[in-house]
Image (spheres, rainbow, N blue to C red):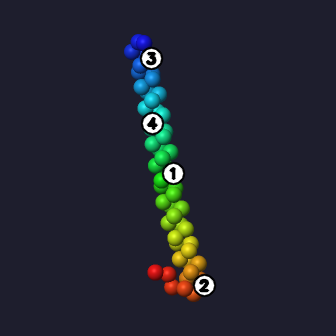
């Protein structure tokens, strides 16, 4: 294998790692946002029903 092939493989590996990292971060952030929205929705519903949320 020559240096060009190694460089191409390394660049491809870095792109794959970057893509996986971005996807993982997006999934974690999406879950956090969804949980926050869910908590606020439950609190708003409880408040509307007349229960005072903690």
* Left or right of 25 in this view: 50: right
Give the CA distance from mark 2 to mark 4: 48 Å
Give the quarter of the figure containing the N terminus. Answer: top left
Residue 7 % position (x, y): 41, 21
Q: Which of marks 2 and 3 is nearer the N terminus?
A: 3
Q: Which of marks 2 and 4 is nearer the N terminus?
A: 4
35, above or below 30, in the image: below
52, above or below 23, in the image: below
Residue 5 tag number: 3
Give the CA distance from mark 1 to mark 2: 32 Å
5, above or below 13, in the image: above
Quarter-of-image position of residue 42? bottom right
Mark 2, secondary structure of its residue: helix
Question: In percent of the image, x 41 and y 19: which residue is there?
Answer: 6
| Disc 1: which residue | 27
32, above or below 17, in the image: below
> Is label 4 in contact with label 3 (beta carbons under 8 Å)?
no
| Disc 2: which residue | 49
Task: Categorize mark 3 by other alpha carbons within 10 Å: few (<14), some (14-19), many (20+).
Answer: few
Mark 4, secondary structure of its residue: helix
Residue 28 % position (x, y): 48, 53
Quarter-of-image position of residue 4? top left
| Disc 4: which residue | 17
Question: In percent of the image, x 46 and y 33: which residue is there?
Answer: 15
Give the CA distance from mark 1 to mark 3: 33 Å
* Left or right of 18 in this view: 46: right
Residue 30 % position (x, y): 52, 56
> Is label 4 in contact with label 1 (beta carbons under 8 Å)?
no
Task: Categorize mark 4 by other alpha carbons within 10 Å: few (<14), some (14-19), many (20+).
Answer: few
Mark 3, secondary structure of its residue: helix
């Amino acid at each position: 294998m020559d240096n060009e092939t190694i460089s191409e493989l390394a660049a491809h590996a870095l792109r794959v790692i970057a893509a996986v990292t971005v996807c993982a971060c997006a999934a974690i952030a999406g879950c956090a946002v969804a949980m926050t929205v869910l908590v606020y929705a439950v609190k708003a519903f409880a408040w509307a029903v007349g229960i005072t949320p903690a």
